[in-house]
Image: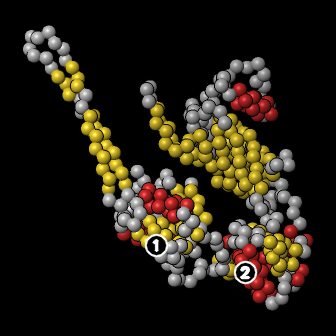
Amino acid sequence: MIRLVLILALWGFASMSAAMPVRLKDLVEFDGVRSNDLVGYGLVVGLNGTGDGLRNSPFTEEIMTNILERLGVNVTGEQFRPRNVAAVLVTASLPPFARAGSPIDITVSAIGDSSSLLGGTLVMTPLNAADGQIYAVAQGTIIAGGATARGAAAEVTQGVPTAGVIPSGATVEREVAFDFAGLSSLRLALRTPDFTTAARIENAINQSFGRHVALMLDAGTVELDIDGTGMRSPAHALGRIENIMVEPERRARVVVDQRSGTIVMGEDVRISRVAVSQGNLTLRIEEAPLVVQPNPFSPGETVIVPRTGVALEEEPGIGLAEVRGGTSLSEVIAGLNALGVSPRDMIDILKSIKAAGALHAEFVVR
């Protein structure tokens, strides 16, 4: 049964003012200012018998042989089956404007049948971007996020010991070519496209500079004229506008998670005039078999006689209640809570109101 109800109403009551202003940097992404994903294939050594089984993971033996040969150790034709090594994939995100020598965090994940990477050391691993070029090199001791204990007949695992992180485990070797200082214009991409919000961003930027330097192109894009701002560089222009406060506009939306019983709603949700009635029907079936024993010294045999108890109960509902037009969803939820409606029933009522066309909001069920 769903036991958790979380109702998040933005500013709670419809009579309160609109949403608080938000910094521009929290509403938009600057075109070109983005991170780049990196990936590499490497080897973890020093495991306490929790590495890959080389018979099941031949790629581990191959990379281990290649590494040893590059270090001058000839293992051609040798048969070795260590249990302290594991093949891994190393992933990282190269932040924008990262310079050569800058450290970045990495994530290490086993790809073979290793049971734990706890305490292992990642051997020097090059990290490639989508263009195939090496942008960073990773190496270091892994911090795993779990533990495994096993015996002859049982095994207990907490967390995920086959994945871990190395803080500042990679060093940037190549910088991403991007002539940011040479830009004459820059586009601001809204994280949540909306015409009203884009228009407010345009007006706020123009008011800050006292002239028309920003232009709304569509619901998700505002173009900034860097040359028109009179600033010395694009970096100076963004440093001035990114802290401008803008009041975002949002669509009326209700999000429901049936697994956890979570209901999240916005302030702008409205309900038209509608009548609501709800009740619960409970069916209980209990088996109580009766064992019948024969008389002493009689030729009879023990017989199990089935006994079934069936009960049908209908709990009283909330009655037929009328919801007046223009009622906010927060007021409806407060009323249902006061009547003791369960989370599952509350979600069903909201779905029915939406199906009746009386809930004026986007209804999202997860």
Q: Quadrant of the C terminus?
A: bottom right
Indicate which disc, 2 or 1, sits on the residue closer to the N terminus. 2
Q: Quadrant of residue 144?
A: top right
**In the foreground, 288 or 113:** 288
Quarter assignment of residue 81: top right
Q: Position of residue 120 (x, y in %)?
A: 61, 40
Residue 315 relative to residue 297: left or right: right
189 relative to 5 in the view: left or right: right
Query: For residue 323, which numbered disc appears in the image?
Result: 1
Q: Position of residue 141 (x, y in %)?
A: 63, 45
Residue at coordinates 30% horizontally, 46% vertically from top-left? 312
Residue at image location 83% in from the left, 54% down from the top: 174
Front-most of residues 260 and 89: 260
Helix, strand or loop at disc 1?
strand
Residue 4 in view (yes/no): no
Give the image location of residue 21, x and y in percent: 63, 80
- Of the residues shown, which amino acid type is indicated by label 1? Val
How has the structure been colored for display?
secondary structure
- Check contact, mark 2 vs mark 1: CB within 8 A: no
**Callout 2 secondary element:** helix
In-front residue for pair 129/220: 220
Q: Residue at x 48, y 54 (%)?
A: 260
Residue at left offset 65%, top offset 42%: 109
Q: Is residue 2 visible to us here?
A: yes
Q: Residue furthest bottom?
A: 210
Residue beneath label 2, please?
200
Tell me the crowding category of disc 2: few under 14, some 14 to 19, or many 20 or more residues within 10 angstroms, Cα based. Answer: some
Give the residue type at disc 2. Arg
